Image (tube, rainbow, N blue to C red):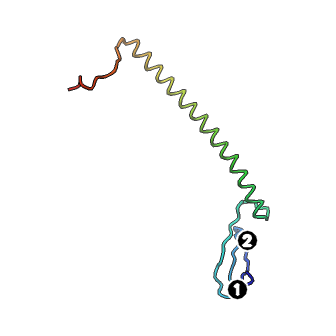
Amino acid sequence: MDDAHQVKCPCCNTILIVDRKTGKILDERRPILDQSTGDRYQDALKKVRERGSVAEEKFQKFQSDRKTKSAKLDALFKDTLKKVEESGEEIGPVNPYDRD
């Protein structure tokens, strides 16, 4: 890449690799992290480690939401079952041949 020149944007820290002869952009390297260490490999490693913790947090949130939803549905089922038992209705399987 002797014919290339690196230009860093002061606003977004994107590094543009520009061909010196033609002026065409050969590569665009956006920063991996907002607070970059300057080493792309260290930034990538840090991002992968953060992704694992974010995934764990999302999983734990999903588990707690699922338990809450399950508890609400169980309570609703028990309340409805109690109302049916108090009303004295008989509930049984529906025979599809009895319908007209």
- Please give the residue where the numbered disc 1 appears in the rendered image: 20
Amino acid type for the residue under numbered disc 1: Arg
CA–CA distance between discs 1 and 2? 20 Å
Horizontal and vertical percent position of residue 60 = 64, 38
**In the figure, residue 9 lies in which quadrant?**
bottom right
Please report the residue visible at 27 percent of the width from the left and 26 percent of the height from the top.
96
Question: Where the C terminus falls, by quadrant?
Answer: top left
**Callout count:** 2
Q: Residue at x 54, y 31 (%)?
A: 69
Q: Quadrant of the N terminus?
A: bottom right
Q: In this figure, which residue is indicated by the disc labeled 2?
A: 10
- Spot occupied by residue 52 in the image (x, y as percentages of width and height): 69, 48
Task: Please identify the residue farthest to the bottom as the structure is shown.
Answer: 21
Question: Image check: 22 left or right of 8?
Answer: left
Report the amino acid beneath label 2.
Pro
11 and 19: which is toward the camera? 19
Is 48 above or below relative to 57? below
Measured as percent of width and height from the top left, residue 35 is found at: 75, 59
Characterize the local packing of mark 1: few (<14), some (14-19) or many (20 or more) Cα atoms within 10 angstroms.
few
Q: Is residue 78 left or right of residue 94?
A: right
Looking at this view, is 9 or 40 the one in front? 40
User: Which secondary structure lies at badge 2?
Assistant: loop
